[in-house]
């Protein structure tokens, strides 16, 4: 029996060493060497202060900033509670929340219609991007709050639009954190 058990234990110890130590260290080291920014969370740093991540949305509530999508993650943009709302399209609770958010956003931005991403959350609840259409309807509110021409805000949005990958994968989008940082650089306020 010992002669049959010994090869199993040796193989188990070897595989534990390879898959539990060698492989993770090789992957971590390779990622740090080849993609250091991505491996460390794609952090956005200003003057040695971490402002956020390019990959995780965060809340901006002041009128002088672009607002992100609605978040269903925890109490809002809680990366530890990433999830969607899990409410179906016929859910009264979801429809009431969308109607209230739409009314609030229409009043804040002085518009009569909104793009879908302005009142819906992403699957993770942490989407860092918004559509260019949603960014552009916010331009009037931001220009007024900062005392700058609306055309300047719209030009900033257009300059920040990221096109679909290879021209076919995804939709045009704007990263809210990067857009707000560029806005602060152009018109501090």
Image (cartoon, helix red, strand yellow):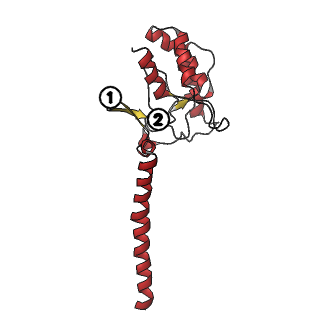
Residue 43 placement, left or right of 158: left
User: Which quadrant of the figure contains the C terminus?
Assistant: top left
Q: Position of residue 187 (x, y in %)?
A: 43, 14
User: Which quadrant of the figure contains the N terminus?
Assistant: bottom left
**Which numbered disc, 2 or 1, marks the residue closer to the eye?**
1
Q: Quadrant of residue 103?
A: top right
The residue closer to the viewer here, 123 or 93, is 123
The residue closer to the viewer here, 64 or 167, is 167
Instruction: Characterize the local packing of mark 2: few (<14), some (14-19) or many (20 or more) Cα atoms within 10 angstroms.
Output: some
The answer to the question of whether label 2 and label 1 lie on touching residues, with beta carbons closer than 8 A, is no
From where the camera sits, is residue 115 visible?
yes
For marks 2 and 1, the one nearer the N-term is 1
The residue labelled by disc 1 is 47
As helix, strand or loop, the secondary structure at mark 2 comes to loop
Compared to residue 187, the image places residue 119 above or below, namely below
Q: Residue furthest right?
A: 168
The residue labelled by disc 2 is 54
From where the camera sits, is residue 103 visible?
no
Q: Position of residue 79 (x, y in %)?
A: 43, 40
Residue positioned 45% across, 11% down in the render = 145
Q: Residue furthest left?
A: 48
Residue 159 placement, left or right of 48: right
Q: How many marks?
A: 2
Q: Which mark is residue 66?
A: none
Residue 136 placement, left or right of 82: right
Residue positioned 49% across, 37% down in the render = 126
Q: Position of residue 61 (x, y in %)?
A: 43, 22
The residue closer to the viewer here, 155 or 141, is 155
As helix, strand or loop, the secondary structure at mark 1 comes to loop
């Amino acid at each position: 029996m010992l002669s049959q058990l010994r090869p199993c234990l040796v193989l188990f110890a070897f595989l534990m060493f390879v898959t539990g130590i060698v492989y993770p260290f090789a992957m971590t080291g390779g990622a740090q060497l080849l993609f250091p920014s991505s491996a460390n969370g794609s952090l956005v740093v200003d003057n040695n202060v971490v402002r956020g991540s390019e990959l995780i949305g965060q809340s901006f509530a002041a009128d002088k900033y672009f607002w992100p999508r609605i978040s269903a993650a925890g109490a809002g943009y809680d990366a530890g509670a990433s999830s969607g709302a899990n409410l179906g399209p016929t859910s009264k609770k979801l429809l009431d929340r969308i109607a209230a958010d739409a009314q609030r956003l229409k009043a804040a931005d002085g518009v009569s219609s909104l793009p879908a991403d302005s009142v819906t959350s992403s699957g993770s609840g942490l989407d860092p991007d918004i559509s260019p259409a949603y960014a552009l309807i916010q331009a009037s509110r931001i220009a007024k709050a900062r005392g700058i021409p609306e055309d300047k805000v719209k030009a900033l949005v257009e300059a920040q639009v990221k096109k679909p990958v290879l021209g076919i994968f995804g939709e045009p989008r704007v990263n809210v954190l990067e857009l707000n940082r560029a806005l602060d650089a152009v018109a501090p306020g």
